[in-house]
Structure formats: structure tokens, C-alpha cells
Image: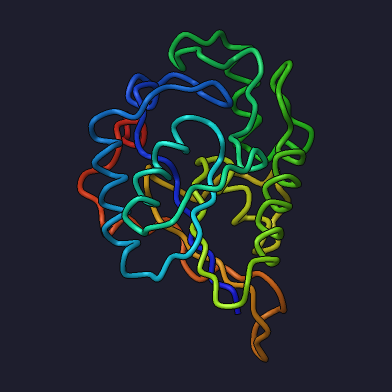
Amino acid sequence: MLQVYLVRHGETVWNAARRIQGQSDSALTAKGELQARQVAQRAQSLGITHVVASDLGRARRTAEIIADACGCPVILEPRLRELHMGVLEEREIDSLTAEEETWRKQMVDGTPDGRIPQGESMTELGARVREALDSLLALPAGSVPLVVSHGIALGCLLGTIIGLPPYAERRLRLRNCSISRVDHQQSPWLAPGWIVESAGDVSHLDLPALDELQR
């Protein structure tokens, strides 16, 4: 059986400012750096052998902190990038027009063919993040990889593992630096292949990130 830990990156400046990131980038806040260190402390007890991360800066920095604590290098994987959100990237959510907000909502409300202009569909996202996960099956026996990616990307991945379409309504909250786990296994009582062991665990963290607070 292969166990894979999935971590959303730490809080960023744009998370706190409620700006849309997608595949654009912003630095971790001081809180985001602390969150990454808290994950790193917990990861030291998990026997992590590989740290694999999206090549976007916020995920890479989170991964570097974790990998340093675990004594292993960071492997960059572009397929773990966040959903490309097209013309809405770098925009403040509160500044969107009614039409632009409709485009954004299509990414979370179950619209099958939703796509922000010049952006990526959830189906395209789902295909590439699943490919990235499946590639970990080639690691040596006994490996325990930890993956650092993004909120929408990881939510889409977990949803597809439990049988939802990649564009399904987004109902899984993955806070900054939350930890999820998926296992590749053969069980008499579960479907063969990938299963979700846990999702969105934040027991190692303090207060939630600013972008996850109700407003």
C-alpha cells in the first residue's frame, strides 16, 4: 500500500487580501510561514521520504520548509499547479462585475463546462492532478510521499477519487496547510486503487487563514 499525504500551501498575501491567485503567485504571509513550520513538525513523525510540490512559488516555499525538516529534497511537479483562472487572476474578489462573478462561481457550483475566459476547466485540472498522483506509484517500495499543492486542485483530486466528476460542486473545505491522506490499496471492503483516508485535517494548526473566515 502507498500512503500519500496532501498539503495545501500556507496562507499568502493574496489569500489574506481576497485576491484571486490561480497560477499567478504571491508570497507566504508570516502566518503562512508559521503554518508550514507546523506541518513540518508534524511531518517529521510520518516517515516522509519524498516531498513533491507544485512549481508555483507559494507551494514551493511551503514544500521547502517541510522538506528541510524531513531531510529530503523538493521535487517540483507542474501538474500540481492550481486551476488557471484566466482573466480573473490577480483580481480582488470584491471587485468582480456580476458577469465575472458568474464565471468564478462556475468553478465551484457544478457547472460541467465552466471556464473563465482564457482559463482552464475543472475537467482539465482533474486530469493533470490525477496524472501527478498516479506518477507516485513508480516510487520505490516503502516510500511515503508528501505532496504540496493548492486548494481547488486538491479538492478536485479528492472528489474524483471518491467518484465525483471533477466539476462537482465544491463542498470540501481545505484550509491553508491542512493535511489530507490518500492510500493506494487492495481491500476486500473498498474499491481497489486510490481511497481517501482523511481530508482537511488542521489539528496541527492554530487559527484558520483569513481567506477561509466567514464574511
Number of numbered labels in the structure image: 0
**Residue 116 image position (x, y, % from top left):** 69, 21
Query: In the rendered view, would you say 108 is above or below 14?
Result: below
Residue drawn at (70%, 58%) of the image:
135
Q: Residue furthest left?
A: 206
Q: Quadrant of the N terminus?
A: bottom right
Colour pattern of the rendering:
rainbow
Quarter of the image with the C terminus is top left
The residue at 53%/45% (across/down) is: 53
- On screen, residue 107 above or below 20: below
Q: Return the x and y of residue 90 as percentages of the image width and height.
A: 51, 14
Rendered residue at 24%/41% (across/down): 34
Q: Name the spot of residue 146 as percent of width and height, x first.
A: 48, 58
99 vs 169: above or below: above
Percent x, y of residue 130 = 70, 53
> Hey, which quadrant is residue 103 in on the image?
top right
In the image: residue 103, left or right of residue 21 = right
Left or right: where does residue 100 sit relative to residue 202? Answer: right
In this rendered view, identify the residue nearer to me: 16 or 140: 140
Q: Quadrant of residue 202?
A: bottom left
Q: Is residue 86 left or right of residue 170?
A: right
The residue at the point 39 percent across, 21 percent down is 14
Q: Nearer the viewer, residue 150 or 162?
A: 150
Looking at the image, which is closer to me, 21 or 105?
Answer: 21
Query: Above or below — where is 55 with respect to 115?
Result: below
Q: Residue furthest bottom?
A: 188
